[in-house]
Structures are given as structure tokens and as C-alpha cells.
């Protein structure tokens, strides 16, 4: 059996995923978590084959959480289930140690196959993401010179939150950071992207299709 932990802060979504997986005879959901801290606690207290992980949970989450989990449990397969379309986060997630990336919109039709693939030691990604990941890896990560690719993982997370309309205070609360720290990250984001305002970031994100979800 493929022992699976589902980590997402929306109980209704977790219930829906469990319903999808209930129809299989080889996948069993043995645990659930609603935030980063609970996810780590559940991982440390049990034995899992696959972690189905939402990137946008309260507290420690996203790429940083993937890196921490893989540092402690390198053999645990992580399937990212995200509201963000693949070209926004997939390559960063894979480089951080994830084994697969699935958009929530496609979960109903692809979740079972995705879990089976990552549990078997294979990657689950679209052909376009596979091509981009290979290209970036072979070129040392400099294949795409777009301004947003200069951002660190934390800066990129804050960039996406800003373009979704979240304030610095709201982002600080969500990520369990100080307002000062988030403000510093925002300043760095603007500097690296050569922009002076959130409005410019939003305009950029819309043009690049980075504001969906």
C-alpha cells in the first residue's frame, strides 16, 4: 500500500482528495495536516510513502517547507498540489526536491496516477515543465533571464502574494514573519526586477501570466 499524507489548509479539499483516493486499492490516506508545523509533526511521527503538499498553507510552507522536509527525509516522495499553474512554481519545486507537480484543477483526473508515479520513484510533470527543468539544469539555471527568475524562493513567494493583492502585513501574518522582514523582501523584489511599485509588479505578472490562481 502507498501510505499517503495530505497537507492542505482547506478541509473540504482534503475531503475531496480522500474521496478520489478511496476508490483505489493501493493508496491509503493515513494522515492529514492543515499547516506547515502540523505537516512536519505528522511526518516525524509516522512512516509515509508520499506527501501530497499544498504550497500555500499558513506558516512555514512552499519551497522552504519542501527543502526542510527533503533535508530530514530525503526518500519521502513529495507531490505538490497547487492552485498555481505549472510554469509559475513547478521548476522551483522540482529543484527543491519535489517529485511531481499537479495543478488542483487537474486533481480529479490525474491525482491517482501522480501518486503512483512518485511513489515508484518517477517524476510526475508535464512535458513542457520537463523540458524547462532539463534546460535550466543543463545551463546552470540561467536559461530564463526574465526578471522574476532572479528572485530567491522566499522573494518569489512574496512577489506572488503581492500581485494577488495581499498587503505586507497580511503576508507577514500568513508566513509567520515580521512586517519588517516582509518589507525588506518587498524592497529586494522591486530592486531585482527593476521596478518601483506594486502596481508595476502586478502589471508584469499579468503580462507573464503569473497572477492566476
Image (tube, rainbow, N blue to C red):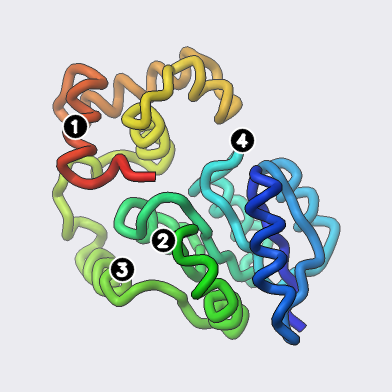
Q: Position of residue 143 (x, y in %)?
A: 17, 60
Q: CA distance from mark 3 to mark 2?
A: 12 Å
Q: Secondary structure at mark 4?
A: loop
Which residue is label 1 attached to?
Answer: 193
Residue 208 shown left or right of residue 71 in the figure: left
Q: CA distance from mark 3 to mark 1?
A: 23 Å
Q: Position of residue 185 (x, y in %)?
A: 38, 25
The N terminus, quarter of image: bottom right
| Farthest-out residue, right | 45
Q: Secondary structure at mark 1?
A: helix
Whether tag 3 and tag 1 are in contact, CB under 8 A, the answer is: no
Q: Position of residue 21 (x, y in %)?
A: 68, 73
Q: Earlier in the sequence, mark 3 or mark 1?
A: 3
Q: Earlier in the sequence, mark 1 or mark 2?
A: 2
Vertical placement of 127 versus 150: above or below?
below
Q: CA distance from mark 4 to mark 3?
A: 27 Å
Residue pictured at 38% horizontal, 19% vertical: 184
Q: Nearer the viewer, mark 3 or mark 1?
A: 3
Vertical placement of 81 versus 22: above or below?
above
Residue pictured at 48% horizontal, 54% vertical: 82
Residue pictured at 24% horizontal, 41% vertical: 148
The C terminus, quarter of image: top left
Circle on res. 95: 2
Q: Quadrant of the rendered structure where residue 42 is?
A: bottom right
Q: Secondary structure at mark 3?
A: helix
Q: Earlier in the sequence, mark 4 or mark 2?
A: 4
Amino acid at each position: 500500500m502507498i501510505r499517503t499524507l495530505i497537507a492542505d489548509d482547506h478541509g473540504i479539499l482534503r475531503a475531496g482528495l480522500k474521496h478520489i483516493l478511496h476508490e483505489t486499492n493501493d493508496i491509503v490516506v493515513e494522515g492529514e495536516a492543515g499547516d506547515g508545523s502540523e505537516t512536519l509533526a505528522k511526518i516525524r511521527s509516522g512512516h509515509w510513502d508520499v506527501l501530497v503538499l499544498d504550497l500555500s498553507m499558513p506558516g512555514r510552507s512552499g519551497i522552504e517547507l519542501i527543502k526542510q522536509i527533503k533535508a530530514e527525509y530525503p526518500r519521502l516522495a513529495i507531490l505538490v498540489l497547487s492552485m498555481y499553474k505549472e510554469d509559475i512554481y513547478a521548476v522551483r519545486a522540482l529543484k527543491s526536491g519535489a517529485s511531481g507537480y499537479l495543478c488542483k484543477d487537474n486533481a480529479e483526473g490525474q491525482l491517482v496516477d501522480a501518486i503512483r508515479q512518485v511513489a515508484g520513484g518517477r517524476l510526475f510533470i508535464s512535458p513542457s515543465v520537463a523540458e524547462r527543468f532539463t534546460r535550466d539544469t543543463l545551463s546552470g539555471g540561467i536559461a530564463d533571464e526574465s526578471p522574476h527568475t532572479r528572485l530567491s524562493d522566499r522573494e518569489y513567494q512574496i512577489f506572488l502574494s503581492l500581485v494577488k493583492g495581499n498587503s505586507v502585513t497580511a503576508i507577514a501574518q500568513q508566513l509567520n514573519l515580521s512586517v519588517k522582514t516582509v518589507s525588506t523582501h518587498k524592497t529586494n523584489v522591486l530592486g531585482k526586477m527593476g521596478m518601483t511599485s506594486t502596481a508595476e509588479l502586478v502589471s508584469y505578472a499579468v503580462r507573464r501570466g503569473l497572477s492566476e490562481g
